[in-house]
Structure formats: structure tokens, C-alpha cells
Amino acid sequence: MNQVGRPEPPPTGPVKFVAKNMRLDLRLIAEMIEPGSRVLDIGSGDGSLIETLSRTRGCDARGIEIDMAEVTRSVAHGLPVMHGDADHDLAEYPDGAFDVVVLSRTLQAVERPREVLRQMLRIGSRAILSFPNFGHWLVRWQLLSTGRMPMTSVWSRPWYETPNIHPCTIRDFMALCDQDGYAIEQWLAVDDAGQRSPWRRFPGLANVFGEQALFRLRRA
Amino acid sequence: MDLPDLPDAEHQNVRFADGLELDCGLTLPELTVAYRTYGTLDAAGANAVLVCHALTGDQYVAEPSPVTGKDGWWTQVVGPGRPVDTDRYFVICANVLGGCMGSTGPRSLRADGTRWGTDFPPVTIRDMVRAQKRLVEHLGIERLFAVIGGSMGGMQVLEWAATYPDALFAAVPIATASHHSAQNIAFHEVGRQAIFADPEYHGGRYHEHATIPARGLAVARMAAHITYLSEAALARKFGRRLQNGGLSIFGDMFQVESYLRHQGSTFVRRFDANAYLTITRAMDYFDLAADHGDDLAAAFAGTQARFCVVSFSSDWLFPTRESRALVRALNRAAANVSFVEIPTDKGHDAFLLDEPDFHRTLAGFLAGCAERAGLAR
């Protein structure tokens, strides 16, 4: 379900407890989750986040994944993963079934992002999301200078076949949270080198230099 | 066809003299459960796996059947080093209530020395599960590590999870559904009518005439067997090929016809017609949601069991959409559920065949559960 392909950045900075070869945003997400939490990872991919959470943090972590080969691999690896997707399968869960619901690098590819977000915060007390920032300077520059849809290492597929049908910027996302009444508990942006950005208090700068954004929300 | 009745082989069993109360309101005065076990029960009694067989299966899951001499029906799945590893788990498989391999059923003798025949009361999937529960208790097991089964065996798995939620750690319903569909009931009815139409059926009292309704039962098996395969599998295995490679199709037989006739004729040597009627009826009655106020999620309310639902892409008898409906009900109950659809062209029968992805999935799911349950390696 991780439609935005991107080469693995080398692990940088201190990694407290999570697997070293895990994708950076997943490591950052794992650090945001309390031990022992009930977690649903939507778009669990190869299952590395739920494996880390259940084996090292004592979490009851489960996954939903759209790619059947990944589902089979995960279940065969002993991880509780079901075939399904964000748009159609969240509505079934009861309110508050999870402490944390995770959606990494997938928001931009779902059919109804706003509804998915609403469902996430209905079935979970907290939602953690990561997404590629469409407000990044390179994206802006390419559109401005060439007049064509940007093609970067993050936005790497041409417009006519990209699964990323709902790109948004960090500011767009913050506006939606404000509009729908979600409190942002924590957020950060990661720059091209995979480093956490230093612009914690300046969303405008983060929206220019952050390649990926990571948010932890709760119902306000 | 003139065939002798089934041989009365000796089957390992346990008798419960106090009988069994059935859903229909009647009570069986005595209950016999025929079963086999494989592997060793650990000191804590925590590594027991119950395998539930399908409509025409039996308890000989991992060893040759004494009736047919053929290999166990799930030797690829159950055995040393197999996904259900008998070096690690204590595996139990029982002949279902209403069956004909030693458990109480229409072929069983009553107190007066006559066979039950058509007097055998209608049984339900839940009755079958109650009989299994008696066996499990008899074996000294409080909680099963896992209950696994495909097709009708999967119905039993679901019934176990709904009826005895605290008596199992993991549940693996395979190629199954929470109810028998109208189409499935329709196919069963064709089979039953074929049996009724056989003059040797004698209103179900064929034992008294020293005969069996072999022709009708064979047709029932042939019709059912078509539903176990996919169109693609039939095309791949037989296509339009003729049996003897003759030039004229007139008077010659297609390979698929020959195959089905073989399926029918071997079946009647190992299965009792009245048992077939009883068990197909039990499957038709099965509707887990109806038993829980038409809310399937209510059947699993509060369950702590870990589920692994498996379907097969070309199975049109128990299609993936029914597994998905089951998974959604489990989600509504906030159950821990894994769900995989295995890509295959082998149809419903795929769960009995060589499907490496399925076997890996099952082995991995059980290993993950064993880790959670703290089972010794």
C-alpha cells in the first residue's frame, strides 16, 4: 500500500529500540507509540511496524494491507494481518477499538482521505499519519519552471498512472485537522536527507523543506 | 449396482453413556465419538489442536483409512514437520456426529439392535461441536490451542468460537462461510433427490434389504464433486479430451465423465447414504448469524481468540466474498483476525491440495499464536 516509492535513507540519528533497517518514518512512528497499546496499522506492507511494536513494545498490533502477497508473507511470518483497505474496511470496527491507528504514506492514495481520517479517529483514540509533502520546494519549482506535473524521487510516477490521487501539503493537512476538529499532539517534517527538520515552530518553512510529514492526532 | 454395505471396521472411540441433547430437542440415549490423535499432549495440556473434517471426510486425517487403505485426507497439512506439526502439537480429529466412520450416526445400532437409518434425528453443526467438546474434555483438555477446518470443518470452527469462546486460543476457518447459501443448499438437494430416486433406497431402509442406494449416492457425489472444482481446473485436467482418444465423439466418453463416474463409484464404497443425507442437512441448516439475532458479530462478541480466515480465489462454492463478510463481522467484534485469499485455479478443493502459500500461511499463523500462547518450541 506504500505507493510512494523512495530509496531507503541510511539510518541516521539515535534509534532507541526499533529494527535498524526499518523505514525512517516507521521508526519515528514506533517512537510515538506507548508500549502495550492496541494498534491498527493500515497499509502494513511487509509488517515491519507491527512486528516491531508487538515483539519489542508489547503492543497488540494488527495490520490491514491491500497487496495480497504482502498479506500472505506477513501472516506466514506470524503477524496478524488481514487483506483489506483504508477506504472500505475501517467502517466495520467499533468505536475506540484501538489506542492508535496508523496510516503511513497512504493518505494521498486513498479514495476519500477526509473520511478515512474521520474513521481513524473514530476507531482509535489517536491517529498517526505520515505522507509526502506536496508543498516541498522542488515540487513547487518544477511546476513553476516547467509548467508540468512534478516528477521527483518522492512523486515518481507520471500523472496518468500515479496511485497518489490526493496529494496535499503540510498546511493543507493542518487546515483539515483544524476544520474537522482534530488536535495535533505532535508533528514533524523530515527533509531530503532523512533528518528531522528543525522547523518545529515554523510550519511555513517545514512546508517548503519537509519531504515527508508525520502527525499524531487526537479528537479535540 | 449391487454393492455390499460398508465394512464394519473397528474405530478408536469413546462412549458417553449419558448421551447427547440435540438442538432438535431430542436426546441421543448414547453417544459414541470415533477419533484419532497424533503427537503428544504436553504437561500443561496446552498444545492440543482439533482438526474438523469436511462433509465426506473422516478422522483419519494423517494416516491411511482402514476402510479404503488410502492415505489420510490432509497428510500435506498434518504430520511431522507439516504446517500442523505433530512433533509440536497434539492433534485430534473426530468423526462428526451423524457420520459413518464410527461416531454415532444413521448407521449406528440402537439399543434394540436395529440401525437408526432414517429415524436418526436431524443434527446441526452445533450438535457436532458439542460431541467434539465431550471428546476434548474426555481427553483432559480445558482449552484447545487451535481449532482448524475447511468447508464444513470451517463451519465447525466458527461454531466452536461462538459456542465455546474460552475453550480455544486460535481458530482457523478455511474455505467456509457463516451460513450455507441458497445455491449450496440447491446443489445438496439435487444430491439428496438422486438418493431418494434410487429404487434401492427403500425409503431409507436399505439395510433391511441388504442393499445400498449406490447409484443415487454416486450421482449425489458426482454433482457435489463438480462444485468442488473450478471451471479452469476441469478444463486444465480434462478439457474436451475423449477417454480412449477415439475419432468419433458418438459412443465415446469424455475424460471428465469417466473421472466423475470414478469419483461416484469409489465414494459409495466408503460412505453411507443416510449419513450423507444427515450431514448435508446439517450444513444446510447452518446459519451462525440467525442463531445470534441475525447479527454475525454478536456470535463473536468479546472473543479473545485469534482468527485466521483463508479463502481460495477460484472457490465458487464458498467464495472469498463470504470469507470477507465473516472477517468484517469479526472486525465489528474487534477480534484479532488475519485474512488471506490464496490465488489458485483449483476451486474449493484447493484446501485439500498442494497449495504452498496456504501451507506457509497456516504454519506461520500457528507459530505466531504459539509464541503468544507461550507454547514451548
Image (tube, coloured by chain):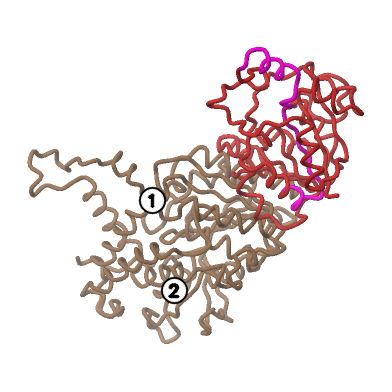
**Left or right of residue A111, residue B109 in this image:** left
Corner quadrant of residue B156: bottom right
- Which residue is at a point 41% across and 72% down the rendered structure image? B278
Q: Give the range drawn in magenta.
A: A120-147
* Amino acid type, callout 1: Lys
Quadrant holding the C terminus of chain B: top right
The answer to which of marks 1 and 2 sits earlier in the sequence is 1
Of the chain colours in the picture, the one used for chain B is brown
Q: Do discs 1 and 2 belong to a common subunit?
A: yes
Corner quadrant of residue B87: top right
Cα separation, mark 1 vs mark 2, equals: 23 Å
Extreme residue in the top direction? A145
The secondary element bearing badge 2 is classed as loop
The secondary element bearing badge 1 is classed as loop
Residue A172 picture location, percent across and down: 76, 34
Residue A88 picture location, percent across and down: 60, 48
Quadrant holding the N terminus of chain B: bottom left
Residue B312 picture location, percent across and down: 47, 46
Q: Residues within 10 Å of mark 1 (few under 14, many from 20)?
A: few
Of residues B343 and A26, the one drawn nearer to the viewer in this rendering: A26
Q: How many marks overall? A: 2
Q: Mark 2 points at which residue?
A: B105
Corner quadrant of residue B198: bottom left
- Which labelled disc corresponds to residue B225? none
Magenta segment includes A140: yes
Of residues B83 and A157, the one drawn nearer to the viewer in this rendering: A157
Of the chain colours in the picture, the one used for chain A is red
Q: Mark 2 lies on which chain?
A: B
Magenta segment includes B91: no
